[in-house]
Amino acid sequence: MYTLTTDGLKTLASRSEGFSISLFLPLQRGGPDALNNPVRLKSLFRQALKQVREGELPAQQAQAWFAKAERQLDHSLFWERPDEGLAVFLAEDMVRCCGLPIAPSEGSFVGRRFMLLPLLEMFHDNHPFYILALSQNDVRLFKANRFSEEELTLENTPLSLAQALAYDTPERQLHFRTSGAPGGGARIYGNMPDRVDTHENLLHFFRQVNHGVHHLLREERSPLVLAAAEYLFSIYREANTYPYLEAEGVSGSPDRVSPRTLRESAWRVVQPRFQAARKQALEEYWQRNHQGGSSHFLQEVIPAARYGRVASLFVAPNHPVYGRFEEETSRIHLVEQPGAEDEELINYAVGQTLLHGGDVYTLAPQETPEGVVVMAVFRY
């Protein structure tokens, strides 16, 4: 099983040779209906095979791809603990099964590119951010997005105030050794200060934590959310050198808080920032609409996406447009009934925008003039 990330989405978008099958299934979770999820997936695969034109893909080969996907799902015990949805991508050189935190519209797609459009809701305002869960007794750093989180390892960093003081300079050193304490715990021997949680000691500890965090995130520009008791916020900010620490944090001791709860709380902090980026991009579209810096014409948007000129792309979901793009002439040809050389062009524009580092957003019906299915802000 694969966890679908932005980088994973780009990997899917980069594939354009051979033949591809994309399956999307909203899942039943719990109860007797959940037992039918594997059956429904097989039915969806059979629907995909009906879309394959004779001679394009041998059925036996496609069956082998699907069998590999079934083994992935069985091996991961996915059906015992299903997510909200499932995406399966089948090709000669790639078979991927991805549990989804959203329930996609059910559908099967065939062509020379994987279908990405049903996944856009997952990545809408879903930029990465970091969470530093900090107390005197523990330090945890997470990389997260709207739907998932993973804990990172802080190298050469004390994970508690006691560690920071114990392995400090000789004049402040405390000595630890294991004793025969009940439960096999460690007792602390040495000159323990009367109050180890003084401002000076906490600041010293937090500077070491900041050093580890800054070293790990030195190439990042994603926001960092601090989760800590409120009185620690100002002390850590005094030590902090990471330039993207959020002004607001998650207040309260994080020691017994699950990673998921921390992520959900931190998401509420960063969500307005990510929504602001979308709002700004949409405002920029309208500001530049009469200056040639943005467009809703497919004849302009598709070539711009292909050659990396699209900074922000807005697409209307459930409005497929079929045709083909000729790279030699930079022209597009639209068709009502797609042939062997045709593909879904909005999906093509999404993939090219992602591959060139642009942002992709979905459009609500009230945000688009009638008949408009795509809007792009150009880099140049």
Image (spheres, rainbow, N blue to C red):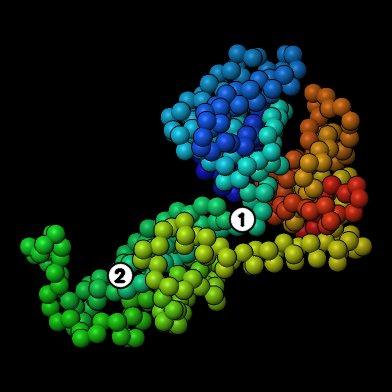
The reply to whether residue 325 is visible in this rendering is no
Secondary structure found at label 1: loop
Q: Residue at x 72, y 61 (%)?
A: 278
Q: Residue at x 51, y 25 (%)?
A: 70
Residue indicated by mark 1: 126
Three-letter amino acid code at the position of disc 1 = Asn
Vertical side of 79 occupied by 229: above or below: below
Q: Earlier in the sequence, mark 1 or mark 2?
A: 1
Query: Is residue 380 left or right of 167 when viewed as pictured?
Result: right
Residue indicated by mark 2: 137
Label 1 crowding class (10 Å Cα cut-off): few <14, some 14-19, many 20+? some
| Quarter of the view holding residue 253 | bottom left
Distance between the alpha carbons at the discs numbered 1 and 2: 31 Å
User: Extreme front residue here?
Assistant: 31
Vertical side of 139 occupied by 172: above or below: below
The reply to whether residue 53 is visible in this rendering is yes
Nearer to us in this view, 8 or 194: 194
